[in-house]
Amino acid sequence: MKKLFVIANWMQGTGLSGGDRIFIELVKRWQLKLNITLFLSKEGSMICQHQELENINQKIWASDLMTRWGYFADILYRTTNSITKAFSVKTLPEDIVFSSSDFWPDSFPALILKWRNPKIVWIAGFYLFAPKPWKKNSPYRGKNFVTGLFYWLGQQPNYHLTRKFADIVFVTSEPDVDKFTTHIRSKDRVIVVRGGVDTISAKKYLNSHDVIPPEKKTYDACFVGRFHYQKGVLELIKIWKTVCQKIPQAHLVMIGSGPLDEEVKNLIKKLDLLKNINIKGFLDGPEKFEIFKQSRVVVHPAIFDSGGMAAAEAMAWGLPGVSFDLKALKTYYPKGMLKTSCFDTDEFAKNILRLLLSPSQYRDLSLEALQLTHEEWEWDHRAKEIYAQITA
């Protein structure tokens, strides 16, 4: 049985990034086909134990020792530690090494293993290109420019090394395929993973007699994702203020956490929306599904994204979506979601109101959302497809 080494040393906190979700769901479904070892951070090990991966061999490569000292100290510590540990890993030809993200603590040790044994298969997860912080619509303009600049600069060597040495690259949307296609790597070795959703729980609910009619649901809209500039969470709060001018009792629920926790809470208070916005923090599994059952619309206001699975999770429960018309989302969500001109917050609010106030349009888009997610996003199907591609 082939061995698969997954490097996910940059997992932090208690939440899951899109890349974390991808490797976890794939590993769940590949564990009977491959001999899998996970190289994780301390936080990552705890997360995986809650994600039904406790029976898979795990090795902790880094603790949360340096987290308190800030981003740069933490990433340097984890990178140095994981590179050192990589020299003790023994691999055989045709073993597979999967770096779950392009961040240094995940990609650099994978690169070391590839250099030590060129016959292994290196699968590099590269899901989001850092935006240039000087661009007009960059989430890192203004006071976050320095952070954005270091993020962009730090990704440049990673991109070129991945492009040159990785055998297979996982991306999340079609526009990124050409960026990794070279004379030594054909397009079929750049795999659009996209992601998947749990449709089993949704199907059971939708086929039961307990389905809640839209007009009786608790929340008019829900958001799922990290509280980060890229996800448009601050824009969403301003959008919701506009929605409330038309529907004073409109209720938004936000699932997630992140570096903008305090800014989100402060803006909600400043705009007098404490009665209209409910923050739930990170939720997963049945707790998250209960929110979907009680929500009418899913909002995905990302201003910079490579795709995103969070909206699809909610759409599997029959929630139509609203997003900005980002290039990556054209292939991710060709239907089931109203697209808004980038980055017109007033139009975004109008699209939410269209769904809330037009039962026929709501019903049509809800059916589209169900069809899209249940036919194209089911995790078991996606995992089989991806496995066939990497072993071809």
Image (cartoon, rainbow, N blue to C red):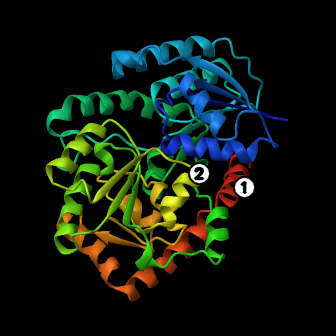
Q: Nearer the viewer, residue 24 or 117?
A: 24
Based on the displayed image, in which of its 4 quarters is residue 146 positioned? Answer: top left
Based on the displayed image, in which of its 4 quarters is residue 148 positioned? Answer: top left
Task: Give me the C-alpha separation between circle 2 and circle 1.
Answer: 22 Å
Residue 281 vertical placement versus 297 (above, below)? above
Residue 145 vertical placement versus 281 (above, below)? above
Residue 285's tag is 2
Q: Nearer the viewer, residue 33 or 254?
A: 254
Q: In the shown orientation, is residue 74 left or right of residue 46?
A: left
Q: Residue at x 33, y 85 (%)?
A: 358
The residue under label 1 is 384
Q: Quadrant of the N terminus?
A: top right
Based on the displayed image, in which of its 4 quarters is residue 159 positioned? Answer: top left
Amino acid type of the residue tagged 2 in the rendering:
Gly
Residue 219 vertical placement versus 361 (above, below)? above
Percent coordinates x, y for residue 173 in the rendering: 47, 55
The secondary element bearing badge 1 is classed as helix
Percent coordinates x, y for residue 270 in the rendering: 14, 48
Q: Residue at x 31, y 46 (%)?
A: 230
Percent coordinates x, y for residue 137 in the rendering: 20, 50
Residue 207's tag is none
